Structure formats: structure tokens, C-alpha cells
Image (tube, helix red, strand yellow):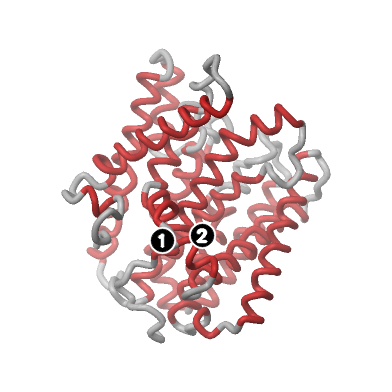
Amino acid sequence: MISGVQSASAKIDAINGLRGLAALMVIYFHSLFPVILQQTGFDWIIRHGWMGVNLFFMLSGFVLYRPYFTGQRSFNRRRDIWVFYKHRFLRLYPLFAFNLLVCLLLMGPVTAERLHAFFIALFALSGFSLQHLLPPLNPVLWSLAVEIWFSVLFPFIVVAIGRYGFKKVFILGLALALLTRIAGMFFANPNVNISILRDSLPGRLDDFLVGMLMVRLYYQQAYFSKLSGKQVGSIALLSAVFLLTAFIGWDFTIRGNYTWYSLPLLNNCIQLGFAGILVLSLKEHSLLNRLFRTWVLQVAGLMCYSLYIWHYLFTASFQLPLPFLVNYLLYLLAVVSLGAFTYRYLEFGHIKDTKALFLLRHKIT
């Protein structure tokens, strides 16, 4: 099954770097872009850092599916499913619950309304309510709810792949996602950027599935290692075209110029663009491979969960009577400091070697 492009048990450094890119894109969107828009009034093409969430979903599909495709893990027994659920719960929920608790107790009065919002978000039910679609306590947690529900569904996807084949499951998932996004066009949305159907798990399922497809290309076909220089250039060009199409398409969407069939397809443009970047990043010794293996992006990727979950809460906190650059550096310092703390002690408190966690010594195993 595996063509030996890289040991199935070895960590893929570029994936960490891509996670770092996704985290930085979202942080830029919520913290720096609003300032640029306020100062210049210009927002064409540069407003789309939120697409880092799409990249996060694709990378989640890649990372979760990888050990099951390579045979390191399986769902052959019912117990395997419960072990997977236990692992995902311990990976996601301590920081998720802690963040919600901090938001409830420290970011405003503890009212009945906020307590209700706390429990809706805690049980990942925000995607089922227009009122809580963007969780009031911390709006970025909407994507964590999608991630949690994908984790619930994931074992059944893997079992279905084993029974019916990847191709059938992949096509069915793509069709379901596209039809869900089209259906979402006929429901009124309080925010053009997010929809209760378009951004539900069914509507975003193809993001995860494309990440899973990348695993198969990487291992089964050894596709990435066979690319010629000309093919690399072609993929880079196509990725840029697809992402630029998505950027411009969303720019028109925000201005109210879209149709029921064009907007749902923009997700697919984003997927194709990021898929190309993923291919080029996983090709050994390529320019993007070297970029995403740099220490800064790798550490940002390792810390991405903590950085993502805290960054939005600080966006309005540093409006001090100081130059903008000083304010922004203080903002980044706060996000990185708190992110590093929860990454170290909440996400990986069971690992004693702090230097290894921050890639200052040997790599984490």
C-alpha cells in the first residue's frame, strides 16, 4: 500500500508549518486586517485570512487519516473506536472547556444568557442554532464545534472506506457537501461569511475529505516525489489561480454579487488552491517544503490550537494611547504568551521535556 516516500511513523514537519500558516492567516484576519481596512478602505483580495480555517480542516483530515491509511491504527474492533474517541476528547476538550470557562467568568458578567451560551458551546451545539452559530463567548469556537463533530463521524468514514472503497465515499462526501452548501443559499444568513448549513459539518465535509485524499496520493501513489520541475511550476500556477478566484469571488460575494450556484463552488476553489500548496509543501527539498520546515512556522503549527483559541479575545484589548506598532506587538506578545502556556500545560502537560515541545531539543515522539 505504501510506496516508501517517508516512514509512516515519522512526523511530517511541513504539516506543522502549514498549520502555522493557517493560524497566522486567521490571526491576521481578526487583528490586522480590520486596521488596514479602517486606515485605507481597501479590502480587495487581502481580507481572506479566514480561509485559514479551510486549511485547518484539510490538515485535520490529513493528520487523522494518516495512521489509519498507513496501517498503524485501525477500527477493526469496537474498542478501537472508543480509544479514538478518548484520545480526541483528551486532545480537544481540556483547552476547549478551559477557554469557555475563562470567557464566561472573566470576559463579562455571569448572566443566565451567557451561562446558556456556555453550555451550548461546551457541548458543540452552536452549529445547530442561528443565535449561537458564532458562539457569543468566543466566536472562533464555531470551527472547533465542526472539528468535534468530524471527530465523532471519522471512525465511520474510515470503516465505510474499508467496506466500499475510498472513491465511492469521497464522491458521496463531495456531493453531500456541495448540495448542503447549495441548500444553505436558500436560508437567510445573519452573516454572509458564515451559514448554518454551508458551514455545518455536512457543508464542510469535503474539506476534510480532500485532506484524506492527500494522504493517499502521498503514500499510495508516491505522487509528490515523482513531480518534475515543470509539473511543480504548473501546480504552483494552478494553486495561485484557484486561490485568486476564491479571493475575488468572495470579494464580490461580500458586496452582494453572487448566485446560488457560484458561492458554494468557491469552497472547492479554496480546496484546490490549498491542495496544490499541500502537494508542493510535501515534495522534499522544494521551496515550500523548506519554508514550512522553518522553526518559527513549525512551532506556530504545534501551538496552533492554543493560538487560535485565544487570539480573538485579545483583539479589542490593546487600544492603548500608543503607536499602532507598539499596540500590535503587545497584542502578539499576549497571544503568544498565553498560547505557549496553555500549549505547554493544558495540551501537553503530560510531556516533561519543555524544550522538545518547542523544538529546542529533539522532536516530539
Q: With respect to residue 346, does 272 lie above or below?
A: below
Q: With respect to residue 172, does 36 lie above or below?
A: above
Q: Amino acid at mark 2?
A: Met
Is 250 left, or right, of 96 in this rendering? right
Determine the residue positioned at 42% across, 78% down: 163
**Crowding near the residue tagged with mark 2, few <14, some 14–19, many ≥20 C-alpha atoms within 10 Å:** many
Q: Amino acid at mark 1?
A: Phe
- The residue at which mark 1 appears reads as 154
Q: First in sequence: mark 1 or mark 2?
A: 2
Percent position of residue 261, x then y? 77, 55
- Work out whether residue 162 can be spotted: yes
- The residue at which mark 2 appears reads as 58
Secondary structure of residue under mark 1: helix
- Work out whether residue 1 can be spotted: no
**Crowding near the residue tagged with mark 1, few <14, some 14–19, many ≥20 C-alpha atoms within 10 Å:** some
- The reply to whether the C-beta atoms of the residues labelled 1 and 2 are less than 8 Å apart is no
